[in-house]
Image: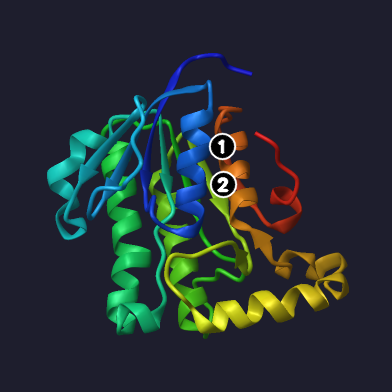
Amino acid sequence: MNVEKRSALIVGATGLVGNELLHILLQSDTYEHIKVLVRKPLSIKHDKLTQVVVNFDELNKYEVEFNVHDVFCCLGTTIKKAGSQAAFKKVDFEYPIQAAKLAKNQGAQQFLIVSAIGANAQSNIFYSRVKGEVEEALKQIQFASLHIFRPSLLLGSRKEFRFGEKAAAIIIPIFSPLLAGKLNKYKPIQAKQVAQAMVQNAIKIRSGEFEYEWMQMRHNDV
């Protein structure tokens, strides 16, 4: 394992995975400086943490903040919360790609993003199509190291209530044992496990493009 002290930037630190990721990075001996881009300050305080309050519609103004080793992108919303498909695409496509371009310009070595199972740029399902388009666009930017994490249903305690996800979180685990073989990628997963997988793979510092589904994320201990 490379013992070089590293710096990280989290885009989307208030979400389910992003929040878990922040706490893991703050506890990691590998990372000595963590920055987060937020719409409003978080209540957490830590010597290693720098919070940068930004307007995500003007990310170009904060390009210098992307001068880190690793950028972790955990942005994501729902069409219901966003209000429209256009607003959803702004959060789930435009912001991540803009962040990736800024990171590339600033010399970031690794870009790690939370996508979703079923991501496919040719999908008839709008959500899956946008996720697929993000993945394809990121590959065109050509980072030294690109990591794409594709969880199915994320389990954990959200700050906002999502009825559909809450119901699914109760029902789906009952049927989870039936999702075997090629279907295991659809199994729900704890947000903390996804965050752990992101950090564990980031500190390996490998070159190339890497994709992770349930099987590759389920057992991680950072």
Q: Check whether the beta carbons of the residues at disc 2 and disc 1 lie within 8 A of each other.
A: yes
Neighbor class of circle 2 (other Cα within 10 Å; few <14, some 14-19, many 20+) is many
The number of discs equals 2
Q: Is residue 164 above or below residue 24?
A: below
Residue 86 numbered tag: none
Instruction: Assign the N terminus to one quadrant of the image.
Output: top right
Q: Is residue 2 above or below residue 186?
A: above
Amino acid tagged 1:
Val
- Colour option used: rainbow
- Front position in the image: 213 or 222: 222
Number of the label disc, if any, that sits on residue 195:
2
* Residue ID at (71%, 70%): 186
Q: Determine crowd level at label 1: few under 14, some 14-19, many 20+ residues with C-alpha closer than 10 A.
A: many
Amino acid carrying mark 2 in the image:
Ala
Of residues 1 and 159, which is closer to you in this image? 159
Q: Quadrant of the C terminus?
A: top right
Numbered label attached to residue 199: 1
* Position in image of residue 34 (x %, y %): 37, 32
Horizontal side of 42 relative to 154 (left or right) equals left
- In the visual, does 40 lie left or right of 134? left
Instruction: Name the residue: 14% across, 55% down.
Output: 58
C-alpha span from label 2 to label 1: 6 Å
Callout 2 secondary element? helix
Residue 205 located left or right of residue 179: left
Q: Is residue 145 above or below residue 56?
A: above
Give x and y (percent) for residue 135: 48, 58
Q: Quadrant of residue 189?
A: bottom right
